[in-house]
Amino acid sequence: MTRPAKLSLFLALFGAVLAAGCAGQHLRSEDTQAITIPNVTSDQAIDAIETTLRRMQFVVEKADAQAGVVRTLPLTGGQFFEFWRSDNVGAASTLEANLQTLRRSVRVDVFEADGQVHVQCITRVQRLSLPENEVASVSQAYRIHSHSRPTTQRIDLHPSQREAMHWIELGEDPKLAAEILRRIARNIEQSRKDQTT
């Protein structure tokens, strides 16, 4: 293979990876997911929601049965080697979480209407924006994001970096919301089976 052909192949692959990574999380807010769960009380639904979110490694920040809301703290996206994690739903989400630092937070609302319990899930996605350190030479390139040694890498932010660091809102993740709702419904169904046996 000639050098120009190799370069073209490399650029095509790089462009495909970049496009897949950037396209994954820019989602519309009207994609909010909801389900209706018959023959269940709001308290039972709240319990099932808390159990489901904890099993998915989310930390519940607030669970208010009277207000009908369960909210989590932001959870950093799972990496490819964290096979037990389930917060990346789909190949695009998995790829982007491995290319960039993402975090997701979940809000689940529970309300009654027409004698049935309705559960609505909204997931928010954010990406970390971390300013680079100034590098004086090529040999210091490992210090772009840290003050680490060449053999040991760790994030050690300069005070100016820490001040400029922020999270960029990317919108919602309807695939994750749908997966959470599916697991909530399955959890409630399993609880019913356990009560009848």
Image: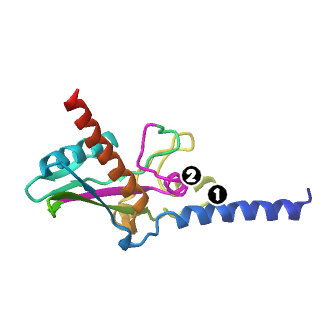
At x 53%, y 43%, the residue is 80
At x 42%, y 51%, the residue is 77
The secondary structure type at the circle numbered 2 is helix
Q: Give the number of the mark in front: 1 or 2.
A: 2
At x 49%, y 54%, the residue is 97
Front-lying residue, 153 or 68: 68
Q: Which residue lies most toward the left here? A: 66
Q: Is residue 77 found left or right of 15 in the rendered image?
A: left
What residue is disc 2 on? 142
Q: Which residue lies most toward the top here? A: 197
The secondary structure type at the circle numbered 1 is helix
Residue 195: % across, % down: 19, 31
Q: Amino acid at mark 2?
A: Tyr
Residue 136: % across, % down: 57, 62
Res. 118 mark: none
What residue is disc 1 on? 138
Q: Which residues are magenta?
A: 84-110
Instruction: Judge whether residue 137 is colored magenta.
Output: no
